[in-house]
Amino acid sequence: MDTIQLTEALIRGRQSKRGFLDRPVPMETLREILSVAKYAPSSSNTQPWRCYVLTGEARAKIVDAAVDAYRASPETLAPEYPFFPKELPAPYSSRFNTFRGMLGDAQGVARSDIVGRRRDVERQFRFFDAPVGLIFTMDRRLEWASFLCYGCFLQNIMLAARAGGLDTCPQQIWSLQSEVLRAGLGIPEGEMVVAGMSLGYADNSMPENNMALHKLELDEFVSFVDH
Ligand SMILES: Cc1cc2nc3c(=O)[nH]c(=O)nc-3n(C[C@H](O)[C@H](O)[C@H](O)COP(=O)(O)O)c2cc1C
């Protein structure tokens, strides 16, 4: 394979996984992934990222507290920043609904099945059983541009993980758990919880780990301009 083919294989080989094997990830591997991910570009090299790596007992404590908080108050947990507008406009709403439908079908949970859907949200807060949970925060004083930088950093982590045979699921839903994370990890008020990420060896026998999501054709999102 030439470099382009290798890159394509790496990029397309990354898919969000929502079920993991009970197989530990060596600490050295985690250090390697984050050591390479830090070479992500950022506006004027500001490097706005801050990452908490949860494994073992620390991960278990956060998971328990997050699941308890969700069970106690499933409707009132609020994210630290808006995820979507109140009414998601077309065409995003149909892409959103298609994705949610596919995920629900794969997990065997209908949209009307409140209990099943709550159980699946709980799985989010269990890091989908992944042995490693990552929590990402950012200085609250920063602006939108730093979110762009953050995306580059997160993608680097996901690709570096993939290169090492690992899988991931980025999870903005963890921003709903800022109180639990602040208390459990000592995250200062000045840091906003941007997202979390599950990381481990995917259980590819699970239907939700085998979804073939539709991606746009080139002409649908690119305008080549030459005159
Ligand atoms: C910034 C960001 C936040 C996300 N948050 C969540 C999340 O909270 N929970 C989840 O299950 N997936 C989450 N995802 C994964 C998306 O659902 C997924 O990327 C999308 O459906 C496309 O699938 P793919 O990653 O397999 O290409 C997130 C992805 C991104 C980029």
Image (cartoon, rainbow, N blue to C red):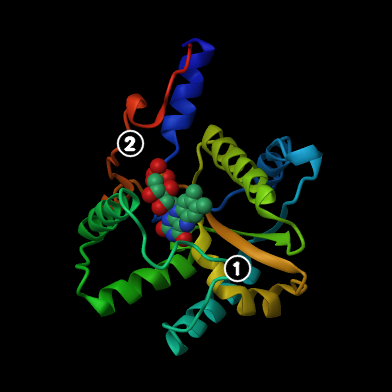
Residue at coordinates 48% horizontally, 12% vertically from top-left?
226
Label 1 lies in ligand 1 vicinity (Cβ under 8 Å): no
Q: How many marks?
A: 2
Asked which quadrant contains residue 112, the reply is bottom left
Q: What is the distance, in whole Å, between disc 2 and disc 1 at their CAs? A: 33 Å
Check disc 1 and report the residue beneath it.
59
Give the mark, 2 or 1, whose residue is nearer the N terminus: 1
Check disc 2 and report the residue beneath it.
215
Other-residue count near label 1 (Cα within 10 Å), few / some / many at <14 / 14–19 / ≥20: some
User: SS of the residue at dot 1?
Assistant: helix
In the rendered image, the vertical position of residue 60 relative to residue 154, given as above or below = below
The mark lying in front, picked from 2 and 1, is 2
**From this viewpoint, is residue 19 visible?**
yes
Q: Amino acid at mark 1?
A: Arg
Residue at coordinates 49% horizontally, 62% vertically from top-left?
83
Q: Nearer the viewer, residue 3 or 78?
A: 78
In the rendered image, the vertical position of residue 183 relative to residue 85, given as above or below = below
Q: Amino acid at mark 2?
A: Lys
Label 2 lies in ligand 1 vicinity (Cβ under 8 Å): yes
Q: Nearer the viewer, residue 214 or 92?
A: 92
